[in-house]
Image: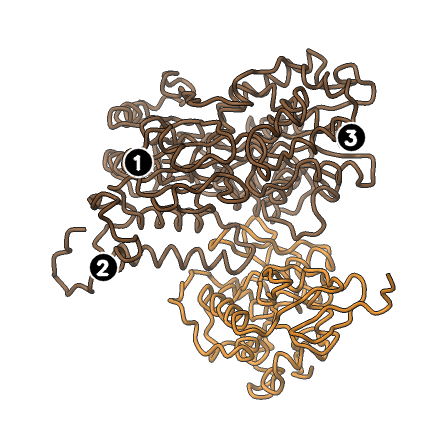
Chain colours: A orange, B brown
Amino acid sequence: MSDERKTFTLDGQDVEFTEGQTILQAALASGTYVPSLCYHPEFRPHGSCKVCTVKVNGRTTASCTTPATAGDTVELATDDLKDLRKNLVQFLFTEGNHFCPSCEQSGNCQLQAVGYELGVVSGHYNPLFPSRPVDASHPDVLLELNRCILCELCVRASALVDRKHVFSLSGRGITKHLVVNAESGRLADTNLSVEDKAMSVCPVGVILRKRRGFRVPIGERTFDTHTASEIALAGARGPTEDGAP
Amino acid sequence: MSSSDRDLAAVLARHRYDGTRLVQILRDVMDPTGYISRPTITQVAESLHLPRAHVEGVVGFYAFFSSEPRGRFRVLFSDNITDELAGSQELRQRMLDAFRVDPDEVSRDGLVSIGTTSCTGLCDQGPAMLVNGRAIARLTPARIGAISSLIRGGSPVSDWPANLFTIDSHVMRRDLLLSAPLRPGESLAAAVVRGRQATLAELRASGLRGRGGAGFATATKWEACAQAPGPERYVVCNADEGEPGTFKDRELLTHHAHEVIEGMTVAAFLVGAQRGFIYLRGEYPFLIAPLEAVLAERRALGLLGRAVAGCAELDFDVELHVGAGAYVCGEESALLESLEGKRGIPRNRPPYPVTHGYLGKPTVVNNVETLLAVAHLAKHGGAWFRAAGTPKSAGTKLLSVSGDVARPGIYEVPFGVSIRSVLQDAGAKEPQAVQVGGPSGVLLAAHEFERKLGFEDVPSAGAFMVFDQTRDILAVANNFARFFAHESCGFCTPCRVGTTLGRQLHGAHRARQGIPPRRQGPAARVAAPQEREPLRARHHRRQPRPRRAGEVPPEL
């Protein structure tokens, strides 16, 4: 079979892909935005947030981890799937303590930006109001766990890039939470440093540099001037401190 | 060096300082109540050269590990719906009152903590509990009184009267697999004589599909593993029987362990594996010593080890791994993660375990019952097996029948039998509904009782929980909502958050009906089946209006 040009259909449109690409990667490369939160172009897809859910030949699956396969029929922007994605983002707002107006990351937060993109105007469900103390022990870094969406990007970056294993997950189900690599449980007692990759991958406002707050004023930040889809399609690796894609 | 340091060093040495054995190591270093202290976590991590946060994450994942001290006696009541219907919540309350503690709270003298755990697989003899990991069935107010006295007396659980820990066997119907036990080595010899390809052909001809629930063709799975590249292969017996309402694997590993392990050895012969694991759920500690004894016996018989059954190219041995309280580890890729000493989080697939399984090597993971069937059909042939059941669901199925029936226990039935016929066999009186396949399965009402067990109609891993006309089905749903919220691994958003929202919704609904949390109100008496409206209509009619402050809750 000649397969010079491999394609699947995405909401009826042919999408080309190269061997090894997942559906999400092929869609982004072809100019179609797929909302996602735990996906990061520099890391192997994780598949946990499920915001990128699509239907492949009628079966619901995460597009970030599903290999693109020639001839597949993929649904992305159906009403059902849009509702599902919106629900999942509402779940994440419900699960943590997200107070956008007073959050240092407002405008640089992917959760907020994807929320706007999907038309999320409220958490919808009764908030769970978890008790998640802030860890301010580190001289240069603040760990604001109230905002954690458990995407494991910091876990992955610290293990795979920094080779430090500063972060890990403990608990399970709704009690799942981020822990740091110290018997005291304090970030100050780990070997995290501000140059680490783990410092720059958080899609929300958990891992923050101290003494940098509000350096870029609200209104001039990445997602104040660009939508989540523009940033994702530009191939940007998430928001930058300068507010540029 | 303190004695606890020496103990830790001995445990680590016994496990060869092997980080893949982390769950086993933690089981051995925890105190009888499951407590593992922060310094112990640090020491284990340093000794195994693992990140401390990784070890902490593993401790935090499994329900039987605790990073907080518990009472010297840790009592966990089985929280399956069948335990609940048999009065477990009243018994638990009786014990909480006796010790004047709240659920999960440690008593002021540090003596006891009382909580719940997911189904302990003793549904045919519930209500049940675990005390410091030891299972006790057939709880009654008198037994609770005796247990409370023993706890007050303070003697270790190992010194308690043996009759407290007796687990009964209730096999109520035997067919192909349970009526004629095999002699150790018998079917393995038949497979070796017949040869690898011919035995695989018999397996294919048998039409055997996996008994864990998904029903994947066993021959297809094993051929894929046999053809996967690389010299190392593994056979894993999934004995993490966690689906609430299922207890048939407990029976099989108690009375048919030789046959199950022989099935594993046949699998090793067919796929070319050198090592095998039995992943036993942590709720079945009473099976550890007997299974180790069977493994030792088979080594002595030349049925495990080098050149098994005289077959020069068959070197195969089996290790027992014990879980630590995690339903999700019954899913094969989560089970493999746990076997590797990690949190039991399911893997993204592809790749599948047949090519990338244990430590990334080709691995077959099969249910206990599947391996028992393999042992029998390796001797009797594919046609013998195929003769029972239906075209799409060959052979027989072991059902774990519990709930409102006169004769709870294991029923081996040919696929294709109706729900009604199982209900009649088990002596169900006025059944309202049956939950087939556990909380993950389906609830069938009376008008569906003619449906047939089988992959083409009602598939099931074997749980069969019966609810009679006196039962409140919403209490069943509430129990299941609680179960899923407790057992969610938490990896994906929909389950992690959705199960908790579901549990809260059920709790809010029950509170509005005036049912105190975690306790069932008086059972509702409803009309006989022929006079009843459909469930849905009845439910809507019974929706109460919101009550005003001070108003007395109506009778349910």
Residue type at mark 2 is: Arg
Q: Chain of mark 2?
A: B
Task: Between label 3 and label 2, give the one nearer the viewer.
Answer: 2
Q: CA distance from mark 3 to mark 2?
A: 61 Å
Percent coordinates x, y for residue A145 in the rendering: 51, 63
In percent of the image, x 73 and y 74: which residue is there?
A: A14
In this picture, is A11 found above or below A61? below
Circle 2: element type? helix
For disc 1, the marked residue is B88
The quadrant of the rendering that contains the N terminus of chain B is top right
Give the residue furthest to the left. Answer: B551
Residue type at mark 3 is: Gly
Residues at discs 3 and 2 both on one chain: yes
Label 2 crowd bin: few (<14), some (14–19), many (20+), radius 10 Å = few
Label 1 crowd bin: few (<14), some (14–19), many (20+), radius 10 Å = many
Percent coordinates x, y for residue A21 in the rendering: 76, 64
> In this view of the protein, which residue sits in the foreground, B460 or B7?
B460
In percent of the image, x 79 and y 41: which residue is there?
A: B228
In this picture, is B514 found above or below B397? below
Task: Between label 1 and label 3, give the one nearer the viewer.
Answer: 3
For disc 3, the marked residue is B272
Picture quadrant where residue A22 is located: bottom right
Percent coordinates x, y for residue B255 in the rendering: 52, 19
Q: CA distance from mark 2 to mark 1?
A: 30 Å
Picture quadrant where residue A99 is located: bottom left
